[in-house]
Image: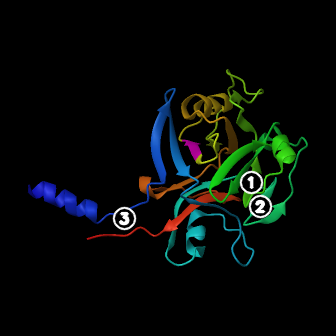
Amino acid sequence: MIRTALCLILFSSLPQWAQAVTCSDQTHEGRSLTVCTADATKENLRLFLRDDSGAILGQFRDIERNLEGGKTLAFGMNAGMYHADRSPVGHYVEDGTEEMRLLTGGSKGNFGLLPNGVLCLKNGSIRVYETLDFQKQTPSCRDATQSGPMLVIDGALHPRFLPDSSSRFLRNGVGTSTDGKTAHFVISNEAVTFHEFGRFFRDVLKTPNALYFDGKISRLHAPQLGRSDGGFWMGPIIGVVEPKPTVTE
């Protein structure tokens, strides 16, 4: 009885996190990944790049410091490739303001492994578009970030992914549901190939479209798992902003 009472006291004193964004560690084909799932109809999903002075934020702690009073970063992940000055390589829109135009041609690196894509956030919805489809449909995005390559395109893996590839890195990306209500943000906790990573989105998460964010700089902020990665300075970051959790005693 004493142990039970102590457990109840300890549990009641923990921060009470909202449940519309949930994170869990999973295993796929013997490899560890962490998945954070957000409900775009309930959560305040936003992109972050610069503070009010125009300086690039770059770390989850810097976003936390810049949030308005009473708010906290309940989830965060690097969200798109960037140049040496940490400005976005591809299309970037934040709160309706475009910083970088859409790029539709070939280029170097993983970004240029066409087809690449765009993550588009609206109030209450979130979708991954292949870049040329994005150009054709011209959706009105409150926030948008372009990255590449696409991992899954209309239910199929990127055509240039090799099943027997030896190129393994930590990787992160996002897949969205057909109705645009749900986003699954995934980071591998060990090195994986593009083919392995894409298969997780296609076969396990069942997302019709998924987009690669980056490789070795992949970082995750998931307070409910007791995790907030530091290290490399980031460019664009996606996050969920919520009221600070209450602590009951």
| Label located before the other in sequence (3 or 2) | 3
In depth, the one of 194 and 41 nearer the eye is 41
Residue 86 seen anywhere in this rendered image of the structure: no
Q: Is residue 147 left or right of residue 171?
A: right
Q: What residue is at 36 percent from the left and 64 percent from the top?
A: 15
Which residue is under mark 3? 15
Q: Kindly indicate whether the residue at mark 1 contacts the one at mark 3 (C-beta within 8 angstroms).
A: no
Instruction: Locate residue 63, reporting x and y percent.
Output: 60, 68
Q: What residue is at 66 percent from the left and 51 percent from the top?
A: 126
Q: Is residue 176 left or right of residue 249?
A: right
Magenta extent: 183-188
Instruction: Count the labels in the image.
Output: 3
Looking at the image, is 168 positioned above or below residue 226? above
The verdict on residue 40 being magenta is no
Q: Residue furthest right?
A: 105
Q: Specify the quadrant that holds the N terminus.
A: bottom left
Which residue is under mark 1? 145
Residue 93: which disc? 2
Looking at the image, is 118 positioned above or below residue 207? below
